[in-house]
Image: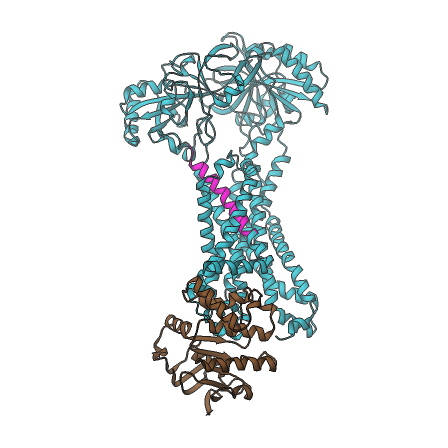
Chain colours: A cyan, B brown
Amino acid sequence: MFKNYIKIAWRNVTKNKLVFLINIIGLSIGLTACLLMFIYIKSELSYDKFQNKGDRIARVIMEYSFGDGTFNKGNYTSARVLPVFKNEFPEVESGTRVFNQTILIYAKENTYEEDNFVFVDSSFFNVLSGFKLIEGNPNDVLNGTNKIVLTRSSAKKYFGNENPIGKTLKLGIAQTEYEVTGISEDCPQNSQVKYNVLASFQNMKNAREDTYWNANYTTYLLLKQPGGLAALQDKINRFMMQETKEMQNVTIRYELEPFLDIHLHSPYPGIEANSNIKYIYITAGIAILMLIIASSTYINLSTVRSMERAKEVGIRKVAGATKQQVFWQFIAESFLLSCLALIASIGLTMLTLPSFNYLAGIQISLLEALNPATILAGILIIVTITLLAGIYPAMVLANFLPVRILKGAYKNTRSGMTLRKGLTTFQFTISAFLICATVIMYQQLSYIQNKEMGYNKEQILVLPSDNTINNKLAVFKTELKKNNNIQYVSATVNTPINIVGGYNIQRRRDLDEQISVTATPIDEEFLQASGLTLVAGENLTLQDIDAVNKNEEEAFYNFILNESAAQKLGWTAEEAVNKPLLMGERNGRVKGVVKDFHFQSIHHEITPLVLFPEGWYNIIMVKMNTANVDQTLAHIQKVWSEVAPHRPFKYNFLDEQFEKMYSTEKRTGTIILIFASIAIALASLGLFGLSSYSIIIRAKEIGIRKVLGSSISNIVGILSKDFIKMVFIASLLAIPLAWFAMNSWLSDFSYRIKLEWWMFALSAIVAILIAFLTIAMQSVKAAMAKPVNSLRDE
Amino acid sequence: MIQLEKIFKWVNSGANRVFLLQDINLEIEKGEFVSIMGPSGSGKSTLLNVIGMLDGFDEGKYTFQGEPVHQLKEKQKSALYKKHIGFVFQAYHLIDELTVYENIETPLLYQDLKSSERKARVADILDRFNIVGKKDLFPAQLSGGQQQLVGIARALVAQPQLILADEPTGNLNSKQGEEIMELFKQLNKEGVTIIQVTHSEKNATYGSKVIELLDGRIVNRH
């Protein structure tokens, strides 16, 4: 019986190749989208689950305040927290502190900048026992100073094919020797703690600090029992009240976060950024939407085609088939189709996985993606599709009365018309919504791209700096400028595109008013190199920088403010110049005022900013003025190797950093664009099938109209009218949705485009145009057909 | 075999009740060959469909082999005709996507027969109708007469006691038509009860009994 079902399903497929193609393409695309999202969701949900003691681990979050009402909170604690907690609370069995650093590593003749060098306690492999050692004993690989553990990949990187155990690496500018005592597997992709090299926490000079301040480390506690966090939390709260009793106005609190909830639920990142459970919901929502859109196309085509299948159903029923048997036959048919679509979509998934990884900013390999769970999910999805898409058509067909069908009454069947119209309208509503979202997102992105930021970001090379380089800064600058293509060289702490650092300023010490500002140390060439405009006063000089490096009594600061800071202090730019100013303990005067510029992403408003001399830097910006970047780079590298032989020549460009700041927006834009394209393609496919059947149904009507003298354009109009009306209604429905969603998206930007009526109109026109083109070809063909063909009665 | 007592069937069109069948009283014995005649719209096909249980009726009693059809549920009726009745149509109504063999096999699929049993029965019928050579062809590759032959083969394969034929020769030329009627006669001789609807006086003569309908009433029987 089943064989017969499959056989007839297959014959129907081969008979109606177009319908088959539409269905299979639609379902495959929908399924692929679903599978990719499933892979993504699964990877996100699996985060840290490989840590077999995960349910007993808690991360300590610190919250502190100096009594001015503002609380700071984050994933940092001082070195003291772990030893004290272990001592004080019997619930705590063990724990580890984690501190990630970028460090220079000297291996043989090469120097590397290792970004993922992590200091941890010797208990690390006991607490995070999901990390497996290939070489070395978990209890003592990090027990003692100057010991390091490499991952399999980093061992290969630093030692090639040699066995690194017992060998040494030189670390940091001081080139301290560390012995390799262990090798572990590489960190799994789905781990919040990631390292390339581990070193013992005891190596850090601050490791034994006896303070709750200097909170620079992340503390993970291993509890004796899972659960019971709330009880322990109470004890910690009481304990900390005691500990801080002596400190005036100061509040310090510690909160425990369940380790396994961190990746999706915590606002504070691990060593790498967290995701958000919200994204999981959105992704799941989109996956379901895709499935519904793809299934809608299938439902539409199946019910429309039911008139073709009606005769068969009638005969089968007369031959003794029960309703259930007919029903299951059609379910089997959609199951077969779904299976074919699943096979196609597994191929598609494999093909698109790399691009998807890139888009979603994740790293999932084919092997991880195609595990039994994915296959199982695929099967679950096709069962869902089969039921979702198959049930209605199967029910319609199974309920046909054979008498009516065999008499020929089925030819004019309009069953399911409302449903089809509803589904098509739904598909186009989603499509129009996504088109609208795409239009608006790209408007905002181009607004960001073209907005006058107030600084120059082109042709600026950014290099790292350290004390060794800072000491030779003058030589470095002179040597670099020997090349005429190099205009300015500025040492600084932040680039103009993203300045961070919280300070307070006040006009006079005796005044109670304090203003919070963002501030950063700069040198005398920062303004020129960044292309900032001085509106009043003067730029810093080398003397100004020397003036702050005197002893505390004599140190004098010359400040550069932005217009917002001057205004906040109650001055115009001109008035501000030479006014005395205090920033924390730094005493000085305003030397210049620069025009406001966007020193943070345009999600933020421009706030008061202070640029000040400090004589300490960690990056160097080189402003070039040339088309010949290669030759200039070669020159910079040559100078670098002379001035900073201890560091690899590792640089990037400021405009690239700028682009990166908006990568999330770009990514979102691309993702929405892709979904919009898929949605509109699926909707159009459905519409195409629907309209071609509508033409078949109305063939006689068209013939009669033609005989009565109707023109071709007239007939095309009649055939398209209903569909265009649906799409028009869909576009209208999409407008409030899009307005609401995009308004909330845009509200995240302090500087944003205004929503204009034309954006919505454009989206509606695009949707209608696509729909019209989809229908028009067939309609014209039908309108041009000879009427005799359709009027000849069988 | 079949007893119809005061069968009425109607449709409501606005305030009016239009009768399709009125006061039909009919008894058909096993082994009869009955022809139903009458002008277009007289209710011939409707009567045939009622007898075949494909269509319902609004009033009256219908007993088929002792079973009160008017009291049966849809499922029971379907089980009943599946077992006892074969249908032949004017437009053949073969499934276009299935081969001759598969078309004939279809009723057996719904009878829970073993695959080997099905094969044997289909092979039998193919042999008997001399269409073994055509078993892998699709309906579109056959002439009208051949298609109707397949239609009859399909009706017979489940070994029904009753064949209902709705103008079986209506789409055929006279020679093909004659062959089909001869076949019916032969089947009747072998004990199959046949009820056919026909326009043709000539075809009616093959039967043992003629029932004439007009406006849903039996006006003559001979």
First to last magenta residue range: A25-47
Can residue A502 be spotted in the picture? no
Q: Nearer the viewer, residue A605 or A724?
A: A724
Can residue A783 be spotted in the picture? yes
> Can you tell which quarter of the image residue A548 is in?
top right
* Residue drawn at 47 percent across, 28 percent down: A272
* Residue drawn at 36 percent across, 24 percent down: A127
Most common secondary structure along the magenta stretch: helix
Where does residue A141 sit, x and y in percent of width and height? 40, 16
Reply above or below: A492 against A684.
above
Where does residue A248 sit, x and y in percent of width and height? 34, 19
Where does residue A150 sit, x and y in percent of width and height? 47, 19
In this rendering, position of residue A179 left or right of residue A558: left
Q: Across the whole image, how many numbered discs are drawn on residues?
A: 0
- Residue A147 belongs to magenta span: no
> Can you tell which quarter of the image residue A684 is in?
bottom right
Where does residue A400 sit, x and y in percent of width and height? 47, 69
Q: Nearer the viewer, residue A63 or A306?
A: A306
In this rendering, position of residue A368 left or right of residue A86: right
Q: Nearer the viewer, residue B156 or A498?
A: B156
Quarter of the figure that contains the N terminus of chain A:
bottom left
